[in-house]
Image (tube, rainbow, N blue to C red):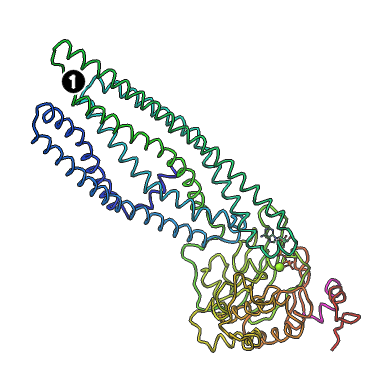
Amino acid sequence: MTALLRLFRFLRGSVRALALSFGLLLASTALGLVQPRLIELAIDRGIEAGSLRAILWSAAGIVLAAVVAAGLNLASGYALIRSSQRMGYTMRNALYRKVMGFSFENLDRWRTGELMVRLNSDVNTVRMFVRMGMFIIVQSVIMVAGTVVAMYLTDPGLARVMALFMALILVLFFGVASFIRPLFMRSRVALDALNNTLQENLAGAKLVRAFARQREEIDKFARRNRDLFNISLDVGYKLSLFFPLFFLIAQLATVVVLWSGGTTLISDFLSGAAGNLTLGKLIAFNNYATMAMFPLLMLGMVLNFVSMAMASAVRLEALLAEKAAVEEKPAPLRLPSLKGEIRFEGVSFRYGEGERALDDIDLVIRPGEKLGVIGATGSGKSTLAHLVLRFYDPERGSVRVDGVDVRDLAFDTLRTRIALVLQETVLFSGTVRDNIAFAAPDAPPADLESAAAVACADEFIETSPNGWDTPVGERGSGLSGGQRQRVAIARAVAARPDVIILDDVTSSLDAATERRIVENLYREFRGRTAVIISQKVNTVRHADRIAVMEGGRIAAVGTHSELLELHPTYRTICETQAGLGPGGRAPA
Ligand SMILES: Nc1ncnc2c1ncn2[C@@H]1O[C@H](COP(=O)(O)OP(=O)(O)OP(=O)(O)O)[C@@H](O)[C@H]1O
Ligand SMILES: [Mg+2]
């Protein structure tokens, strides 16, 4: 419940609209209570007394009250719709901002499908609770309180009997609701699982076909779907207990009221005594009793709404409370540009509880240097790059850029002045131009073109029929692997960074193109720092220096010829790679 109440902070901007809505609702509900009184008047003063005037006046009153009540109710609904939609809107934005603030570590832990359910379905559940649930609760409580008072005023004896039945119904509702509540949380979890499966499957749709795994994936989805089906069925069955039980008790109450009221009227009539109860009063009382039952039923239904919203609120609060593993410090240092020195000082790092991915790294990359990084798969090359941009913070030691600990630098400085081309190419749907201009949306076309030229992307862009407007599908579909990599490199170059890091992004390119790109980059980044990570000697051999990584450590640093001479691992790498002659000497 506290989680749900805490989410009400998103209603802060709508306090006045809410107050207006509930004020109008109060007025409209109170007006609704007038009707049975007017019927009582029509019967006792009109029909019994034979006065047509009294009947007409009562009828006019009933119509007027109904019309005004309907108008007030409508206005109240509008105000509430506005408040609840605003709440949903602000909540979604806040959640999205939260997810955008996630560091890589948070992203490693949260699954996409789960986030989608929270941002869509859970937000909607809470919003609907504010729209319907609160409306119904307020209206029902007013109606129940009002009708109980009205019943007491009409006939205290009968009112006591009714109160007993109403209490019975409430107990029943709370009982069933508490019984169902845990099921709602389980149904959300089942929905998460279904969405994760769906999301991963759609993202990997081509892979599934490539391995002819559709049948297995269909089965997997069906299993998740069945879990959700079973829980939903369980919830539905238990929920359906409400109506029959409720109607049973309500009918019983009516019978008891009619019996007890009727016998009183008859005995008064037979004894000739003028009792307190009249036929009009009995009918009015019965009307109030029926009026009291309806909001009770609504309250019962709303209890489940509350349970559902509570389950969603807990999940939303958990997401909102998630702390970004890497956060910008309060008054970070902003630098207009970097000289480009990167220094690792005793840096160790592990992912979660895993093995050390980096182990006591000491490395200085000088301003303007071209550094190659080579090493076997899993040796920690990408991790090294991720730490420079503070995707993760080191467990021990520090990474310094221009002498400043990256933890003191603004994300803006760090991530706009240093461009990292990620190992896994990610493109957005749009055009080739949109993708290259992603980090520099205001760059003039000439800059984009020169960036494309550096990345050798101009060749395929210019020869394709749509040129720069060549559409790129989701995740870069429509382009070849090598074209995607070149667009990604062009995107980084177009951002005009002071440092560029390429994480194994020439793997899909032929040797000649790769070589041209590396040469272009060296020329383009003359005076600026460039780090080129690769598993291939040919990619890094012309760098000023090459760092060799082995099992999370820097095994050696030196020029190609130095390493070839001095470092056995490097020599072995050279020898095993195709195109390199005996003794590790590459053919000219
Ligand atoms: N997000 C992650 N969560 C957990 N472990 C990870 C994660 N990313 C990498 N690792 C582990 O950290 C180690 C270093 O990985 P890293 O990606 O830095 O290697 P790499 O040298 O870039 O390899 P490759 O040449 O294959 O790209 C590996 O053992 C890997 O399994
Ligand atoms: Mg890597």
Between 113 and 486, which is closer to the camera in this rendering? 113
Question: x, y percentage for residue 123?
Answer: 46, 52
Question: x, y percentage for residue 492?
Answer: 60, 78
The residue sitting at the top extreme is: 271
Residue shown at the point (29%, 18%) measured from the top left: 259
Residue 587, placed above or below residue 196 = below
Between 379 and 150, which is closer to the camera in this rendering? 150
Q: Quadrant of residue 541?
A: bottom right
Q: Which residues are magenta?
A: 559-571
The reply, left or right, for residue 192 in relation to residue 17 is right
Residue 110, placed above or below residue 185 = below
Image quadrant holding the C terminus, namely bottom right
The amino acid type found where label 1 is placed reads: Leu
Question: x, y percentage for residue 171?
Answer: 41, 27
- Pointer 1: what residue? 277
Mark 1 neighbour class, 10 Å CA radius: few under 14, some 14 to 19, many 20 or more: some
Residue shown at the point (74%, 61%) measured from the top left: 212
Residue shown at the point (47%, 57%) measured from the top left: 95
Residue 217, placed above or below residue 370 = above
Q: Dividing the image into four equal quarters, which quarter contains ligand 2?
A: bottom right
Magenta segment main secondary structure: helix
In magenta segment, residue 325:
no
